């Protein structure tokens, strides 16, 4: 099952992300490059709304089924070394690379590449994981023991997530840090907005509803 359809907080993330995409993207048929696009959830949704989507992912196996539909152009790619020409797309989505690239130099390289391929007036939409995400996750699950807390202290200081705590190697930003990195890559008018917020744990309070469909999710619309 795709992550963004699994639990209530996943669907909240999807709904809020779609709201922000609709608000910030240029009108279709603009060209959108979805870098590190996972299973293509966002690319397929945007293509269905008239956008011309290029879906770049690190694994060919993730997009082979979608290639046959012709809804998107798919490729194996690397956020740090994009194949697109200079000033060739209207929007770039980095909804995964900035937390999967642990090193700061790698994140800046990905952001610089995004800026390179954007046309003048183009828009970047980039996502990051908040610095306190792991603490919230462990606290809501009831697993925040002294041993876990000891492992979380360095994460809160450095942002580098310890994969022995679950998830994977990752970097967790502060809002100021994210804004600084994007600006350093040459972007102007940088704004940081929330997606789920720290109250996402409440959304899951009714319990595991892994089989629920997106159309049954409540219309939760957090403010910026």
Image: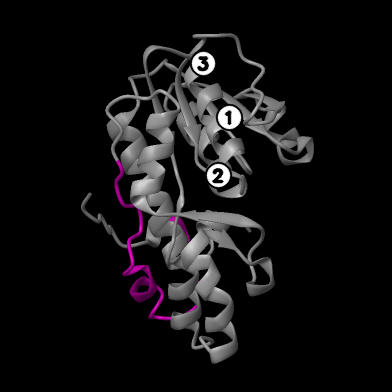
Q: Is residue 213 magenta?
A: yes
Left or right of 1, for residue 19: left
Tell me which segment is drawn in magenta. 192-214
Asked if the residue under mark 1 is in contact with the one under mark 2, i.e. CB atoms within 8 Å, the reply is no
Q: Is residue 214 above or below residue 89?
A: below
Residue 210 appearing in the image: no
Rounded to the nearest angstrom, the CA distance separating label 2 from label 3 is 19 Å
Residue 41 picture quarter: top right
Q: Residues within 10 Å of mark 3 (few under 14, many from 20)?
A: some
Q: Which residue is mark 2?
A: 96
Q: Which mark is residue 109?
A: 1
Residue 62 picture quarter: top right
Identified at 39% across, 54% down, the residue is 174
Rounded to the nearest angstrom, the CA distance separating label 3 from label 1 is 10 Å
Asked if the residue under mark 1 is in contact with the one under mark 3, i.e. CB atoms within 8 Å, the reply is no
Identified at 46% across, 30% down, the residue is 46
Please name which of the two marks, 2 or 1, marks the residue nearer to the observer: 1
Q: Which residue is mark 3?
A: 116
Q: Secondary structure at mark 1?
A: helix
Question: Toward the viewer: 146 or 141?
Answer: 146
Q: Secondary structure at mark 3?
A: helix
Q: Is residue 104 above or below residue 137?
A: above
Residue 7 screen position, x and y as percent: 49, 67
Q: Is residue 126 magenta?
A: no
Please name which of the two marks, 3 or 1, marks the residue nearer to the observer: 1
What scheme was used to colour the molecule?
Answer: one colour
Q: Earlier in the sequence, mark 2 or mark 3?
A: 2
Q: Residues within 10 Å of mark 1 (few under 14, many from 20)?
A: some
């Amino acid at each position: 099952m795709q992550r963004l359809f699994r639990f209530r907080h996943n669907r909240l993330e999807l709904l809020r992300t779609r709201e922000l995409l609709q608000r910030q993207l240029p009108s279709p048929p603009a060209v959108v490059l979805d870098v590190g696009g996972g299973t293509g959830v966002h690319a397929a949704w945007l293509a269905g709304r008239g956008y011309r989507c290029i879906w770049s992912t690190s694994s060919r196996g993730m997009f082979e089924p979608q290639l046959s539909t012709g809804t998107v152009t798919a490729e194996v790619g690397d956020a740090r070394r994009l194949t697109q020409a200079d000033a060739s797309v209207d929007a770039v989505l980095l909804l995964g690379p900035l937390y999967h690239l642990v090193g700061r130099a790698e994140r800046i390289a990905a952001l610089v590449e995004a800026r390179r391929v954007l046309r003048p007036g183009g828009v970047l939409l980039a996502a990051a994981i908040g610095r306190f995400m792991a603490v919230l996750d462990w606290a809501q699950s009831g697993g925040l023991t002294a041993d876990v807390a000891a492992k979380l202290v360095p994460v809160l200081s450095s942002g580098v997530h310890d994969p022995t705590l679950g998830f994977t190697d990752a970097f967790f930003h502060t809002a100021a840090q994210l804004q600084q990195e994007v600006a350093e890559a040459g972007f102007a008018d940088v704004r940081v907005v929330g997606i789920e917020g720290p109250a996402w744990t409440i959304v899951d309070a009714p319990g595991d509803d892994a089989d629920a469909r997106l159309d049954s999710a409540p219309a939760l619309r957090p403010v910026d």
